[in-house]
Image (tube, rainbow, N blue to C red):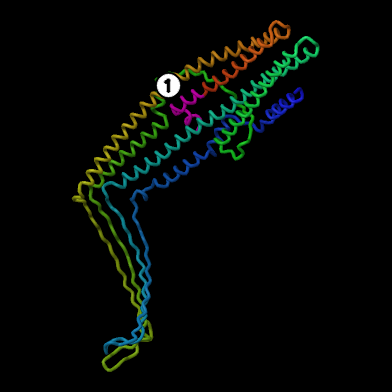
Amino acid sequence: MKRIIPYIIGIACATYSVKAQENLSLSDAIQIGLQRNYDLLIEEGNVEVAQNNNSWGEAGRQPNITFNLNQNNVLTDNVKVAFPTSTRGQTLSNSTQPAINLNWTVFDGFRVNISKKRFELLQAETEGNASIVIANTLQSIILGYYLAVLEEERLEEFHKQLLLSKDKFDYTRVKSELGSAVSTDVLLEEGNYLTDSINYINQQLKYRDAVRDLNVLLAEEDVAKFYTFTDSLNIPDEAYTLEDLRGKMLAENVDLKKQYITQSVLGQATKLSHADKYPTLSFNGGFSENRNSLDLSNANFFTGDGFTDGPSTRLNSTTDTYSANFTLSFTLFNGGRIKRAIRNAIVNERVGQLRVDELENSLDRDLLSALDQYNIRRQLYGINARRESAAAVNLDLSEQKFRNGSINSFDYRDVQNNYLSSSILRLQAAYNLISSKVELMRLTGGLVREYNQ
């Protein structure tokens, strides 16, 4: 057992020492994530599609011009002549008809302008969806980064505990060899040493899992890649007021801004349904040319005195046709469909406004809850920080008492575990406080405003 324990701890320490490969700050992680995150790349594609659709041509203002070309070939072979005047032999007819047509809706009840405005709003709505994804991704990256830092600092605390237990075990073993400690003391410290070894190894797994999760958020191909995190758990200490936060939320919250745009889209749908009440004026113009070529060299024609051969050269003709037409159409009655569509659009717009009101109400609740949580966690962090400081002093004093025999191993172990627990709770409280601040920033639009520049 004396040989196995140092071997186990040597492996654990070696694994921990190899973890760092390159520096990574929080700002670097955010920039990498914004460039490579899969969800953001998907939303960029959706925004590009919406930008392409936002054009006057898609709205219907520009005319539609088409070109058609028909080519026909007909071979007629008169094998049997039924009447004396029938044509005998073969006739070959070739024709080509190129044509250009123009269709243009001159007026359709302001539908073109309304559609163009709707495309603009749809583009803004898609960009709003992208902003929501950006905010959520930023929140995930920030918390993922700090979670990896948290697990790393926890690992350091477990490492301190492990080194302290090893020192106690070695000290007690030496005392036992000198005859001033019994074997039960050695076994006790050995058990503590093994327990701390297990805790340290388990914490290594949590740390590696946190880094792997961060690599997924950063779309890193090598998910096993490790970093030296240059940003520590920065403790926020800002004091917020509900009125200030609510004003920012109503103006900058990405979910609410997107819902406002959606409501505007519904308003344009209502206007679009009213356009069906107006007449439609359209223009259609075109040009076509019919080129015919007739081969009668293999045909015979009855002339009264008998049959004569057809001309040896082809007979060619060309016919040009021009057109310009206006069409005015007006729906007099279609079973009340237009009125029903207008009423339905108005109802949808009213429902959309209810969704806006509902979102504002739920965001008010979320903001108040997040602010309350932030203030409570500020207090909890202060308490845990003071508790850790007191536990550290107590640990130093208890070590001296343990070495001079004033306290036994059981009491010293309790002090040691109390310090470790205090340190872990202080780190968790720091992470929780950062998480609350990030949530406040997300609700008030601060994440996109501060980090997506």
Please provide percent x and percent y for residue 311: 35, 86
Please provide percent x and percent y for residue 243: 39, 20
Please provide percent x and percent y for residue 128: 42, 36
Residue beneath disc 1: 369
Main secondary structure type of the part rendered in magenta: helix
Q: Which image quadrant: the N terminus? A: top right
Q: Determine which quarter of the picture holds residue 252.
A: top left
Left of 150 or right of it: where is 244?
left
Q: Determine which quarter of the picture holds residue 350.
A: top left
Q: Residue at x 31, y 33 (%)?
A: 353
Please provide percent x and percent y for residue 302: 29, 89
Q: Determine which quarter of the picture holds residue 123.
A: top left
Residue type indicated by callout 1: Ser
Q: Which portion, as a residue range, is magenta?
A: 435-452
Residue that protrudes farthest toward the top in the picture: 406
Left of 395 or right of it: where is 75?
left
Q: Residue at x 64, y 28 (%)?
A: 204
Relative depth, front residue between 24 and 161 = 161
Q: Residue at x 32, y 35 (%)?
A: 352
Q: Residues within 10 Å of mark 1 (few under 14, many from 20)?
A: few
- Secondary element at image label 1: helix
Q: Residue at x 38, y 71 (%)?
A: 71
Residue that protrudes farthest toward the left in the picture: 332
Relative depth, front residue between 409 and 281 = 409
Left of 67 or right of it: where is 13?
right
Magenta stretch: includes residue 443:
yes
Please say whether residue 453 is visible from this viewpoint. Answer: no
Indicate whether 117 appears above or below 100.
above
